[in-house]
Amino acid sequence: MNNFLTRRRFLIGSTLTASTLGLAGCDALVENGNVQSVIKMAESLTLRTQRFLIGDTALAREFSASEISPTFRANGTSMPDGAEYQSLLASRFAQWQLHVGGLVERPASISLAALKAMPARTQITRHDCVEGWSAIGQWTGVPLGDVLRAAGLKKDARYIAFHCADEYEKTLDGSGWYYESIDLVDAFHPQTILAYAMNGRDLEVPHGAPLRLRVERQLGYKQAKYVMRIEAVADLKNLYGGNGGFWEDRGYEWYAGI
Amino acid sequence: MFGSSSTTSGQQTLIRRHSLTVRLSHWLNVLAMTVLLASGLQIFNAHPSLYWGQYGADDDPSVLSLQAFENDGGLKGVTRVGPLSLDTTGVLGVSEVDGEPTARGFPAWITLPSYQDLATGRRWHFFFAWAFVINGLVYLAYGFVSRHFRRDLVPTKAELTLAHLGHEIADHSRLRFPKGEKARHYNALQKITYLVVIFLMLPGMILTGLTMSPGFNAFAPFLLDLFGGRQSARTLHFIFATSLVAFVVVHIAMVLASGVLNNMRSMITGRYAIRTEPSLSKASETAP
């Protein structure tokens, strides 16, 4: 009996050790570069499968006004602290301009009043954070496709990058500025808009004033806030970390349709 | 594959129970579902609350929530399900990370990776979701084409009578398992359970998962109506996963209780030993 208990204790002890080793083993496997490159292959499979199934123009669901979330959680930066943004905010964005450049025929700088004078689209859609929560809100803005058609994309433009006014992570090399990018399929999708109003009012600072992107078939981190500059590019390698977005440079998928 | 005799040694007959396709897909599924569970709990930990309906976030009422509260200088973990609150410090809500009590939905030992890393959890979840879906489609195609489902899993009319089912439940609860010729086939409780898992729970897992995808919503908006919204789908995904964990616990308990070596051999090599009367073994060789 005594023997049995000792043996039992030994077994329990070795099981605990094995599970601790198992944990460390799993973490080591997760951090292995070769394993990571295999695991990352799922993203392009997901992108290609979803694009094939969804098509380029299928719409995200739009909701009724009664389904709007009572509180829309603001995530990420809620107040950019840069001097330039602060001075723009002080004059309620009267001096703010959206710069459109990169691989375009006619670079432009568009004031908020000029954007509001363009034909607008209003949509009530669901915002899905990568963390798992969702909120429904109403967005009004200019279809991105209209802005891009006015600027005229050059032939080799493949992606549209969005440069933002919030430095999400303070770094010495300036790699912590928020940015995002989408391809031309999403850029010209009818529900992809540059929104300046939310729930019928001017966009508030925590939600990205004066202008944020809405890409309704993707997750929340693609919906760049505080958009200052739009850049048409041939590839994403030359932007910051080279993965096409702030969170993408920190391990998240560039295609956030799931 | 089920029931064709191969070698006979005295009273013990080795039958071929599981085909190669079933064995391979079973073990691939074990791997995929293990990673999916651990990475799924990692993803859940990024926002350890569940809601019902189209939307749901911090200020909306949740149906389940794993929370952490400051309590006399320490951290207290609370699991709240509807109106019920339970102190689950150490396991749910608050558990130790490097010896320190930390606010955390599920504990480190059950998540992949063990530390908080949503991006990695997502990548592993979706990689193994693909493996799980492809494996499942191959298994389904095989099951229909080879008539595995019809032959081995669809209960007979006689098995579906209340008297028969009551008898099986009574036997099972006393851990009395079929012997001899009866052990050649799954019993009715096994058949029904496997059919529910294969045709309800696993597809439910996949469909509720896809309903959380804003991209897939544009392709199949009817799934939002079927499950009652994205947040309902997220809650159902969790409920299906919990039910599957419960199934696996019972499944493993039954494997252990009904002869672990014989069961393991049958799922690895395909061969399963049954005890037959010598006079019956000849006749049984021609049985299906």
Image (cartoon, rainbow, N blue to C red):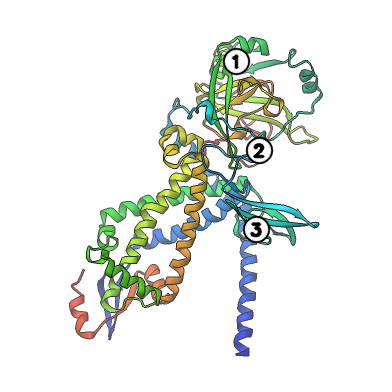
Residue at position x 61%, y 45% from top?
Answer: B119
State the residue lying farthest toward the front.
B83
- Looking at the image, residue A202 sits to the left or right of residue A146; the answer is right
Give above or below for B266 relative to B237: below
Q: Amino acid at mark 1?
A: Val
In the rendering, at what x and y percent does residue A138 appear?
57, 25
Residue A45 seen in the current view: no
Closer to us: A11 or A118: A118
Q: Amino acid at mark 2?
A: Asp
Q: Secondary structure at mark 3?
A: helix
- Looking at the image, residue A110 sits to the left or right of residue B205; the answer is right
- Looking at the image, residue B205 sits to the left or right of residue A172; the answer is left
Give above or below for A132 relative to B200: above
Label 3: how many residues lie within 10 Å, few (<14), some (14-19) or many (20+)? many
Q: Which residue is mark 1?
A: A104
In the rendering, at what x and y percent does residue A34 appear?
58, 50
Label drawn at residue B134:
none
Between the C-alphas of marks 1 and 3, the distance is 49 Å
Q: Secondary structure at mark 1?
A: loop
Q: Amino acid at mark 3?
A: Ala
Residue B72 seen in the current view: yes
Q: Which residue is mark 3?
A: B108
Q: Which residue is mark 2?
A: A249
Question: Quadrant of residue A147 in the image?
Answer: top right
**Quadrant where the N terminus of chain A lies?**
bottom right
